[in-house]
Amino acid sequence: MPVPVAAAKGALSSHLDGLRRTGQWLADQSGILAAVSGGPDSLALALVAAEVCAEASVRFEAVVVDHGLRDRSAAEADQVVAALTGRGIPARRFTVSGPAPMTGRQAWAREKRLQILCDQARQTGSAVLFGHHRDDQAETVMMRLSRGSGLAGLSAMAPYSLYQGVVFGRPFLGLSKGDLISVCQAYEADFVTDPSNADPVFERVRTRQWLQHPGQKMARQQMMRLSAVSSRLAARVRGECERWCAAHALFTYRLRAELQADAFSQLHDEARKHILRYCLGVVGGQPYPVSEEALDNLLDRLDTGQKSTTGGCLVQMTQTHLRLIAEFGRPPEPELKAEAGRLYCFDRRWLVYAPQGGVIRRLGAQGWTALDREHPVYEALKTWPARLGMMLPYLDGLDGQHYHPHFTSYRHVCSAAGRATADQKGLHETEFVLCSLPEDGALTLAKTATHDR
């Protein structure tokens, strides 16, 4: 076996073991999706993952997304699918819907691709693997360093992470692009070359060209070391925030956080900013963390007793508590068309199962007023302020019914979609069930007798 292929297979096998240790992926119930564009990185991933998953009896499929940004993108996507299926590798093509914007087209295409991958992963209970490698990591750190990113940003891409409730994996961060090209050559597999990857109009291309200069070998190594150190420090900071919040904060789903004012006031400014950033991330439902400047401004206003709106939250300090409440009414209000029997991420806060086709919306003031809080299911909501209740989702079914939420666990939401054991299937066939999504971010691995003692 060629050395690059052996290294890639070893990395993938080790990664599957790591996925199990995240506690978010069960090999006997879950599968693997590989995000494939047809370039050498993702093609090498599909070729290697198909073999390793077959050997491990893990369900595998390659997903090809046509973003439609180039005239030949659809034909290229079809060619990639045909090449994979011709080798006996399961593969499907999906197409991004909607017109591309005039600006930020690459970011738009990336987000659309992620949404398609996440949707397929939710329906099949799969983790999504990407072919990112060591050179990608160095580029990402360099770009974020130039923007003044903090610890979390400089950590760059984590080998295991959660995004909207879906596990993402990057098994090849220890390999180079050259290694993955060699893997494709060993399999005699032709890969697609995207001309935009050489267009210096894009920041990543300019960064890549600078780092690939022979005189920048030391810079590449320094970027990787900076990423590793930042990742360890960020994990430690996050752990400290979680421990502090477990002792001094109370969360109501991802809608409200109440922090003990005395304990918060005793922290130094940097610790207070870390706690606020963490809580805003949990409650705010925003795609990106708040900036350092926004945190400084928020602390200044809290010190003077002013109410503030930051990161999708209403924030206020009282004599006893610091309260962060999810902001209702910020346009556009989330609205999601749903098909019957599918899982969805709604409002970046909820994993929901739709028993009927229809539209998922927030309850709003009228829906919250109409909700029967005398019903045993909603008894716990009697003490909720309207501001929280209005944020709850409901399903406006095509059958003319309004389906109100039934709170349950993550595993029960998944079983409602028929993804668990046979005796659990159909457990909530007619119920609109939901649970809180865990917040996005890097995943840690559980220690075992043979790992990380």
Image: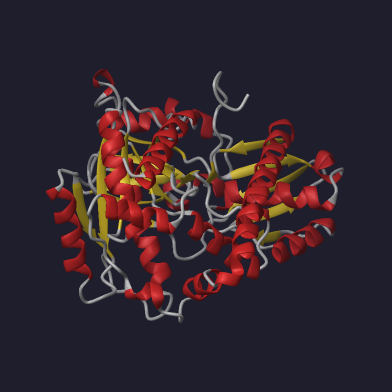
Work out whether residue 353 or residue 44 is closer to the camera in this orientation and state it. Answer: 44
Which residue is nearer to you in this view: 64 or 418? 64
Q: Quadrant of residue 446?
A: top right
369 up-or-down from 57: above or below: below
Could you tell me which quadrant the N terminus lies in?
A: top left
Q: How is the image coloured?
A: secondary structure
Tell me residue 284's x, y (percent).
Answer: 57, 53
Left or right: residue 282 versus residue 28 is right
Residue 194 shows in the view = yes
Q: Is residue 1 above or below residue 132?
A: above
Residue at image coords 44%, 48% = 172
Note whether 453 is above or below 431 in the view shown: above
In the visual, does 140 lie left or right of 417?
right
Which residue is rendered at x = 47% and y = 41% of the image? 437
Total numbered labels placed on residues in the image: 0
Q: Is residue 407 visible?
A: no
- Residue 448, picture quadrant: top right
- At a point 59% along the width and 62% down the height, the residue shown is 220
| The C terminus, quarter of image | top right
Between residues 262 and 240, which one lies in front from this camera angle?
240
Q: Is residue 438 left or right of residue 338?
A: right
The picture places residue 253, in percent across and down from the top left corner, at: 54, 38
Where residue 46 appears, x then y in whole percent? 29, 48
Q: Nearer the viewer, residue 210 or 246?
A: 210
Percent across and percent down for residue 319 are 82, 44
- In this picture, is 403 found above or below 25? below
